[in-house]
Image (spheres, rainbow, N blue to C red):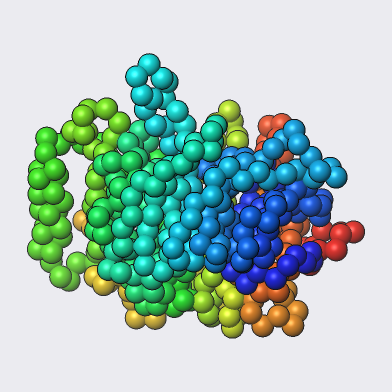
Amino acid sequence: MMFFLHNPTPLCLDWCVDGTVCYAADTTIVLYHPQNATVIGASGKVHNKRINCVRWVRSKGRKGRSLVSAGVDGKVVVWKIDEEKKVEDLLVLQPLAVLDHDDFVLMADAVMVTVPGEGDNNDDEQVLVVTATTDIITTWLVSLQTGKYKRLYTTPPPDKVYIMCLCVLDVCQGGRYPVLMCAGHNAKIYIMTSRDLGVYGSNEAVCTLTGHEDWVMSLSVMREDSGDYLLASGSKDSTVRLWRLTTTTTTTTTTTTATTTIKEQQEQQQEEPKEQLQVKSCVFQVPMLGGGGSVCCDVLVRLEAVLAGHEGQVSEVYWAQPVYRGNKWHQPHQLLTCSKTQDRSIIIWQPQDDGEEEDGKNNDGEKNGVGEEEDGENNDGEKNGVGEEDGEKSTGVGLWVEVTRLGVVGGNQEGYYSCQFSPDGTYVLACSYLGALHLCISSMVWTRVGNTVWLWADTHTKWLTLPGTPWEG
């Protein structure tokens, strides 16, 4: 194990695609290489109180070399790594912009957006930062070249929810602006879209996902090779729900027409026979680039699965990152979840192979089946899947099962606050209450594909500590 300064927050860790981990060590940020167990960089002390959240800035789904941090002192700082300047062989994080808030900031997320240039100027890539305090969502625009920033919009959260997790992402290829997802203490997940940069819904959500029975603690989204998206949500009710987002491009003439289309579809669902197995769905629209606002992307959201394997609060959910294979990027169907109470464990989930016969149970008895009633739940709360209508096959990827369970915490009764895959999926890094980082490596048999990518050869295997290193896993 490697110990940093104590920081009992679930958003204090993020793993970049180049293998660098940023960790919020109390009031500073540490850049770290887990495989080598070496610190490679650090920030100055811009925050004067504990940092609640640190996240790499994403660009087209990939994490870049800039990051954002949010603290109890009400500051949100956009950092840029100075590759040329080093102090005692350590990279230096330079504060590019400091965004002041009137209250302590719970969390923040950031993504690169293209802003049209003025006059003869070319389009400029800037950072869209979304922050959340106890009762306000604020959006900011920051230039990576100059450090100049401006506040775009401020709005209360939907239903005045106390936000516990949020993420900003593109759910439509060619969408005009990113979509904002947030969730909190009322067990609901809100999806908000924007027709103007940074203006999210004026306290209204275009889609609300229900089904959890307690606080929603974490959200994570990945894009499948087919173009669909999977949203994973972890809750205090000890379950993880997977939601499928399917996109289609349509042309609408007015906002009223689009609203009517969605309303008609929802009324049609209500008129379907009650005895028919079905899963409730939600439809919303995302404005596309070009078309003068008349071209929108319809997004259909359905419940894909309910995963029940933890015995306590699920503190984080995290999808494996895309890998490069066959001259293109491939998205593995692997989900990482962790719990910080009772079972204090980390679970790796993935769909059961189509040709593999399995009774849907693992050694610990967590059963994952198919078929849910109208309300999105079943009697025992342990089954997953989507309802099929008229004999049609489900659009899902198959039965999700637990393939590996990790969890060596010693005397720490709080369990794991955060867990993440390495960029190539061969390592798992977790953070515990006392600030210890736990690194696990897969001991399975590997198959070499191409020059750089390694894939799973056997899904039923153990994860072990790296020999000759001070890690525990």
Identity of the residue drawn at 67% across and 41% down: 81
Q: Nearer the viewer, residue 305 or 431?
A: 431
Q: Is residue 232 visible?
A: no
Name above or below for residue 441 compared with residue 79: below
Image spot of residue 175 (x, y percent): 33, 37
Q: Quadrant of residue 249?
A: top left
Q: Is residue 47 left or right of residue 133?
A: right
Count of numbered badges drawn on the protein: 0
- Seen in the picture, residue 83 relative to 274 is either above or below; the reply is above
Name the residue: 52% across, 43% down. Answer: 58
Q: Position of residue 78 (x, y in %)?
A: 56, 47
Asked whether residue 215 appears in the rendered view, the answer is: yes
Is 197 in front, or is 321?
197
Residue sitting at x 13%, y 43%: 255
Quadrant for the N terminus in the image: bottom right
Compared to 455, does 28 lie above or below?
below
Q: Quadrant of the C terminus?
A: bottom right
Residue projecting furthest to the right: 468
What residue is shown at x 37% (from left), y 52% (from top)?
180
The foreground one among 102 and 247 is 102
Q: Residue 362: x, y in percent?
A: 57, 71
Of 183 and 391, which appears nearest the observer?
A: 183
At which x and y percent is residue 178?
Answer: 37, 43
